[in-house]
Structure formats: structure tokens, C-alpha cells
Image: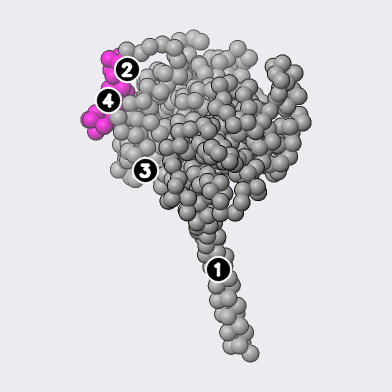
């Protein structure tokens, strides 16, 4: 009896182990197959007929033109870059500031409440943010700046800033929390003010974590689709000010893929944009990961 | 502040609570100027807590409450016009675990000067002299003079602890508080730090917390015994160890509290 039960336990344990291993392996498999799929869909045109100089250098995006087909993605790249840049210049200072406030200035109860709010902010779906951009931000921007339309870089940038703040706040807060308390006591006991403690000790000591937080925020901003599709005005354009409408790489895929005939050139170019986005976010996340690992390794 | 005052630190009916827990009870404690005073007592009796009152670093925790009076150099440090920054310049602190900042040896030593006069442009030669003087005072100059720009957190522990003493000196403190400064060090390094403390006496008033009675006997002029938040007995070190007045002190120095 006793012996039998042991055997049953051993089998169950082995089965569990196989199952867990399968889950782990399948995660890797999924990622590889997604990458493979995206690459395969774009590969035909990428290696036959694709003109990288046009793609990266021209703002002419006429994928459905009968007579003058052009696949210049420069304006789309500029759209993504401008929205991400504006979003980061809002979200990074705001996010790090909020993280400093949470980790250094508020105690028990308030800290927990703020962290829950930040998490809730992260849980709002992208399309809801886009909706806010359309129906709330749009009229506000029109009224404030007396602009004909409020769907532009400013709108998209603010929305994406709000969307990427939670990750920046929570990773920055982790980074600050990881700074040993003995450093704080050392500086305070030498007579440092709270402010001196922050900028002379905490920020330098946490700088890798803060950098990683910023990078992950950028990754989030570059990859964001639905909200920017709705909030940026959808006009292919290199912006000259934040009041210009733009269209991003992601929004272009979302808007056009449904209408592009499968395996047509247009369809394949959209997948090449996908490869580009994939590569950008991959490099950013990898860098962030290495930076974080660098901290732990020390 | 009267320059000739005998006592650098004076507490009257000092009580301290961590939330609901009372960690100090009616402590009346006086520290003679220019001497080394040791605080001994079993673990958890409030030695660290008392020490951390003297530079008010206890107040970091929002749930700490104190009552009573603490005078440092004749000044009530809870008076509303007292500047915490000036207080901490006057009263330096060395912690149980060496805690140099994660910057160079050099920058650790001038850190205090930089934060106390943030707008002043220090001449490099002036700072160099200050660093050399501070390191010489703690007998580190010969070991570290070629390594001033290495990260201080990579030094050996005893070097780190001496550096933590050295970085107080440029601020010209009156009082140096040390919380079990040797507990992370081996016996050889402990002796070296004790020797250093003896050279600091006279120039500075030193209060040292230790659970090591032999150390208290070796370095201190006066010694105070604490038990469960109370100051039981405080007198000249040789008297405390040879003729303790309170039976609880006697029990402790004979090792009956473990
Ligand atoms: N930050 C704190 N919060 C709550 N209780 C504390 C804190 N620091 C110390 N205590 C309590 O106060 C008492 C005295 O502690 P401490 O001063 O560290 O003793 P010692 O240094 O003599 O070992 C202990 O019972 C300890 O648990
Ligand atoms: Mg202690």
C-alpha cells in the first residue's frame, strides 16, 4: 500500500514536471513561430523588389495607387518617432517623479493606495484610451489652441504618455527600493537634505533601473496601436509641430491590413513594417533586460 | 553654548516610543566632553535607539515619538529653531555596518562639504588637502593614497569603516556617535579601530555602543549600562566594572544575561 502510493506520487510529480516544462517550451515556441510567421509573410517582397532606400527615405506612401505605387514609410516612421518622443518627454520625468514620491515621501497607507491606482491605470484597455483621445482630448485641444482639429501628435503623445507611465513608475519604484537603506542613512546622518539625498545618492545609485524603466516605456510607446490610431488624426505627414496630425507604423498596419489582398505587395510591405517594429521593440526590451541584469550582477 | 561646559550631551527624562512600544524610559544621561563613553547592555535594550536620538535620525520613521529633553553643547535639539542639517554636521555618526556611499573614496570624504555648501566652488587643491588630512587622521592615507578614485564600496570592510569615520572629519564635528562600529570586523581590525578611537578622544566627544564588554573596558572613560529601555548605571568605566552599584549591572558584567 505504502509503496504503491509512493509510486503514484512519483508518476504525478513527473507528469507535473513534463507539463510545466511544456508550458515553458511552448512560450518560446510561440514567440519563434510569431516571428517566423511575420517574417515569412513579408519575406517574398523583402528579398524581391523591396527598395529599402524608398522605404526609409521617402514620404510617399501610395500602396493602393493604380499608376504610381510607392512604399515610402519615412512619414510613418516620423509619426511613430514623434508620438513616442513626446510621450517619453512627458512620461519619463512624470513617472520617475511619481516613483520618487511613492518610494521616498509617502508612508504605508498612501503608498499602497497610489500603487493600486497605478496598477489600475495599467489595466485600462488601449481602445478606451483611444476613446478618451477622441472624445475628451480632441475638443480640449481644439478649444485651448484654437486648432481646427485636436487629433494630432500632442493628443497621441499625451495618451501614450499616460499609457506608458504605469510601467515607468513601477519599474522606477523598484529601482529606488533596491537602493540599500544604509545609503539613505549615511547621507542623512551627514546632514543631507531630502532633495540632496535624492539627486546625489538615490538617482545615481538607481540609474540603471531608471534607464530600464525609460526603455520599457519607449518599447510600450513604439508598439502602441489602437490609441494612437484613434488619437493622432491619421494623416501621413512629417510633423512640424505637435499640432500636426500624423500616422504611426502600427496604426498603418491596423488600418490597411484588412483591405490589402493577401500576399499582394501591399500586404507584404505591411508585414515588413511589422518586422521593423518587432526589431525595434526587441532591441529595446533586450537592452532594458541587459541593463537590469547588469544591476543584479553587481 | 558655553565653551567650557563639561558635558557635550545631556538628556532629561527622555522617553521614546516606536508606535506603542516604549523603547526608552526616563533616560537621564550626560556625556562628558572630549571623552569616550560606552553604552553597554543586552541586545534590544535600546542602545542604538538612544544613540540615534542624538542626531535625530530616528525621526526618519514616521511612527517615532519622543518626550523629554536632549541638550547638545547646551542647545536643546528639539527647539523649533534648531537646524537638523547643522545638528548633523556637529554630531557625526558611524553605523554598525560600514556604509560608504557608492562613489569614490575621495568623493565620500568631501561629500559632507559638498552638501553643506552646495554653491561654493571648492578649489581642488583645498579639497585634496582636506582628503589627505582626513585619511591621515584615520591611518588610511598610506593604504589608500593611490586608490582615491576607486569605488569606496569595493574596499575591505575595515577600510570602509575607517573611511566612514574619515568622512565625518572635514565637517569638524564636536561629537561622533558609533553604533557597534566593529561588529562586522575581525579581531585585528577591531583593535585597529579601537586605537583610532583613542586618538580621536580629546578632539572629539565619542559615544560608542558596544555589546563587547572587553571593548568597553579597553576604550571608554565612562560607561553606561542599559536594560529594557532604562539607563541603570553610569559611571567611570573602571568603577562600573570593578564595583557596580546596581545588582543588575553586576549580573550583566558577570555574563548572567547572555
Ligand atoms: N525601527 C524600529 N521600529 C520598531 N521597533 C524598533 C525599531 N528599532 C528598534 N526597535 C525596538 O526597540 C528596542 C530597542 O532596540 P535597539 O535600540 O535597536 O536595541 P539595541 O541597539 O540595544 O540592541 C528593541 O525591542 C527593538 O525591537
Ligand atoms: Mg543596536
Which labelled disc corresponds to residue A274? none
Which image quadrant: the C terminus of chain A? Answer: top left
Q: Which of marks 4 and 2 is nearer the N terminus?
A: 2
Residue occupying the point 66% across, 37% down: A229
- Residue at label 4? B136
Residue at mark 3 shares a chain with residue at mark 4? yes
Q: How far apart are marks 1 and 2 (CA)?
A: 62 Å
Give the distance between the C-alpha atoms of the residues marked 2 and 3, in whole angstroms: 29 Å
**Label 4's element?**
helix
B129 magenta-colored:
yes
First in sequence: mark 2 vs mark 3? 2
**Few, some or many residues within 10 Å of mark 3 (<14, 14–19, 20+):** some
> Camera-side residue: A158 or B27?
A158
Image mark 1: chain:
A
Q: Return the residue nearer the eye: A5 or A291.
A: A291
Kindly identify which residue carries mark 3: B185
Q: In the orientation shown, which residue stands out farthest toward the top?
A: B2
Q: Name the residue under label 1.
A: A22
Dot 1: within a 10 Å radius of its alpha carbon, few (fewer than 14), some, or many (20 or more) residues? few
Q: Badge 4: few (under 14), some or many (20 or more) residues near its Cα, within 10 Å?
A: some
Query: Is residue A112 in view from this perspective?
Result: no
In the rendering, which numbered label is found on residue B127? 2
Image point (54%, 22%), residue name: A195
| Residue B202 percent coordinates (x, y) | 37, 21
Amino acid at each position: 500500500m505504502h509503496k504503491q502510493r509512493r509510486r503514484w506520487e512519483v508518476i504525478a510529480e513527473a507528469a507535473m514536471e513534463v507539463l510545466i516544462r511544456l508550458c515553458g517550451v511552448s512560450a518560446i515556441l510561440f514567440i519563434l513561430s510569431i516571428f517566423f510567421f511575420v517574417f515569412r509573410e513579408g519575406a517574398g517582397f523583402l528579398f524581391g523588389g523591396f527598395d529599402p532606400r524608398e522605404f526609409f527615405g521617402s514620404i510617399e506612401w501610395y500602396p493602393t495607387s493604380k499608376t504610381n505605387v510607392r512604399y515610402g514609410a519615412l512619414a510613418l516612421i516620423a509619426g511613430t518617432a514623434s508620438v513616442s518622443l513626446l510621450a517619453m518627454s512627458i512620461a519619463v520625468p512624470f513617472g520617475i517623479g511619481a516613483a520618487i514620491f511613492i518610494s521616498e515621501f509617502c508612508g504605508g497607507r498612501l503608498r499602497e493606495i497610489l500603487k493600486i491606482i497605478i496598477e489600475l491605470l495599467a489595466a485600462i484597455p488601449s481602445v478606451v484610451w483611444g476613446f478618451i483621445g477622441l472624445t475628451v482630448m480632441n475638443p480640449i485641444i481644439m478649444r485651448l489652441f484654437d486648432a481646427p482639429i485636436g487629433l494630432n501628435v500632442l493628443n497621441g503623445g499625451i495618451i501614450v504618455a499616460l499609457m506608458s507611465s504605469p510601467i515607468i513608475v513601477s519599474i522606477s519604484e523598484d529601482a529606488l527600493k533596491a537602493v540599500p537603506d544604509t545609503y539613505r542613512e549615511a547621507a542623512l546622518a551627514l546632514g543631507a537634505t531630502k532633495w540632496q539625498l535624492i539627486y546625489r545618492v538615490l538617482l545615481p545609485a538607481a540609474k540603471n533601473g531608471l534607464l530600464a524603466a525609460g526603455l520599457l516605456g519607449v518599447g510600450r510607446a513604439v508598439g502602441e496601436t489602437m490609441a494612437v490610431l484613434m488619437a493622432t488624426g491619421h494623416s501621413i505627414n512629417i510633423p512640424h509641430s505637435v499640432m500636426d496630425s500624423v500616422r504611426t507604423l502600427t496604426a498603418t498596419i491596423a488600418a490597411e491590413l484588412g483591405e490589402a489582398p493577401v500576399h499582394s505587395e501591399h500586404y507584404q510591405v505591411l508585414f515588413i513594417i511589422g518586422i521593423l517594429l518587432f526589431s525595434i521593440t526587441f532591441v529595446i526590451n533586450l537592452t532594458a533586460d541587459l541593463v537590469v541584469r547588469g544591476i543584479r550582477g553587481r | 553654548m558655553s565653551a567650557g561646559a563639561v558635558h557635550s550631551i545631556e538628556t532629561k527624562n527622555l522617553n521614546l516610543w516606536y508606535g506603542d512600544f516604549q523603547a526608552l524610559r526616563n533616560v537621564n544621561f550626560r556625556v562628558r566632553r572630549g571623552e569616550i563613553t560606552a553604552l553597554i547592555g543586552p541586545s534590544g535594550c535600546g542602545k542604538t535607539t538612544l544613540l540615534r536620538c542624538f542626531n535625530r535620525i530616528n525621526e526618519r520613521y514616521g511612527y517615532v515619538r519622543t518626550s523629554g529633553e536632549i541638550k547638545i553643547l547646551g542647545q536643546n535639539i528639539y527647539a523649533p529653531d534648531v537646524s537638523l542639517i547643522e545638528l548633523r554636521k556637529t554630531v557625526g555618526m558611524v553605523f554598525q555596518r560600514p556604509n560608504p556611499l557608492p562613489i569614490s573614496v575621495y568623493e565620500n570624504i568631501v561629500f559632507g562639504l559638498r552638501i553643506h555648501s552646495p554653491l561654493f566652488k571648492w578649489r581642488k587643491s583645498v579639497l585634496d588637502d582636506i582628503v589627505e588630512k582626513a585619511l591621515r587622521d584615520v591611518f588610511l592615507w598610506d593604504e589608500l593614497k593611490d586608490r582615491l578614485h576607486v569605488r569606496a564600496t569595493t574596499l575591505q570592510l575595515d577600510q570602509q569603516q575607517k573611511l566612514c569615520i574619515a568622512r565625518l572629519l572635514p565637517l569638524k564635528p564636536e561629537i561622533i556617535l558609533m553604533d557597534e562600529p566593529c561588529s562586522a570586523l575581525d579581531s585585528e581590525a577591531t583593535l585597529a579601530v579601537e586605537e583610532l578611537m583613542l586618538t580621536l578622544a580629546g578632539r572629539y566627544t565619542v559615544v560608542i555602543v558596544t555589546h563587547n564588554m572587553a571593548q568597553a573596558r579597553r576604550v571608554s572613560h565612562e560607561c553606561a549600562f542599559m536594560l529594557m529601555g532604562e539607563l541603570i548605571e553610569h559611571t567611570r568605566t573602571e568603577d562600573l566594572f570593578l564595583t557596580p552599584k546596581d545588582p543588575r549591572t553586576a549580573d550583566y558584567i558577570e555574563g548572567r544575561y547572555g
